[in-house]
Amino acid sequence: ARLVVLVSGTGTNLGALLEASVEPAWGAYVVGVVSDRADAPALRRAEAAGVPVHVVPVADHPDRAAWDAALTRAVAALEPDLVVLAGFMRLVGPAFLGRLGGRVVTTHPALSPSFPGVRAPADAIAYGVKVTGATVLLVDEGVDTGAVVAQTAVPVRDDDDTASLHERIKAAERPLLVDVVGRMARRGWSTSPDNPRKVLLP
Ligand code: GRF
């Protein structure tokens, strides 16, 4: 299956997907990496792996709709079977979801629906939860509100700060994402006839 990965940051999740794709049995390969930021370190990982990179800066467009349309064109041109938002820090818009919706997943460093948005590890510490985790979600028009595909739990330690907790979450998030993307790529997925929010991985 053809994967397109969207990134904004360090790209450790992208790195895990690139490593997994070396094994043909995983069933997917990264055909392109797209970012909103030319300076995202994740892009160096893509280049090192010989994967095409495309940057769509928000500042290059008069408004969000124009940016969303440009992002959609860049991703759709790669003809992805599955799009993975791996540390992508922008909300994809109606053009993107209209064209690619239904085959876009994201990884989130919390147990959704807890702590949506860009500060999930900090919010977990502030709230005082004892267990948090990582979630792979289908992407819908909301902020981390799509159907849950898979989750893994991660303990919060009393001496954690945001960085130490986020690193522990990321250590669990990478294998979760690799497992889920591989299964979706190899055998697809469905939702329960009784509950459209219940995602079934074969
Ligand atoms: C990941 O924890 C992801 O869930 C969150 O931001 C982090 C990105 O890390 N959205 P990386 O860029 O994949 O290293």
Image (cartoon, rainbow, N blue to C red):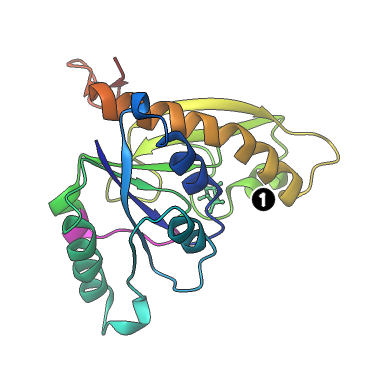
Q: Residue at x 44, y 71 (%)?
A: 37
List the residue tagged with mark 1: 122
Q: Is residue 48 above or below residue 170?
A: below
What's the magenta bit mostly, secondary-structure-wise?
loop
Residue pushed farthest right? 159
Residue 78 image point, x, y percent: 20, 55
Judge from the rendering whether residue 167 lies leftward or rightward of residue 23; answer left or right: right
Residue 17 image point, x, y percent: 44, 40
Q: Residue at x 17, y 60 (%)?
A: 95
Judge from the rendering whether residue 74 lies leftward or rightward of residue 9; answer left or right: left
Residue 105, image quadrant: top left
For the C terminus, the image quarter is top left
Judge from the rendering whether residue 99 lies leftward or rightward of residue 184; answer left or right: left
Q: Is residue 95 magenta?
A: yes
Say whether residue 111 is visible. no
Residue 92, image quadrant: bottom left
Magenta part of the protein: which range? 88-96
Q: Residue at x 37, y 32 (%)?
A: 181
Residue 54 image point, x, y percent: 32, 67
Q: Residue at x 22, y 64 (%)?
A: 74
Q: Is residue 34 magenta?
A: no
Camera-side residue of 21 and 107: 21
Query: Which SS class for mark 1?
Result: helix
Camera-side residue of 47 and 33: 47
Q: Is residue 200 above or below residue 64?
A: above
Residue 194 image point, x, y percent: 20, 15
Q: Give the amino acid at mark 1.
A: Ala
Residue 52, image quadrant: bottom left
Residue pushed farthest left? 99
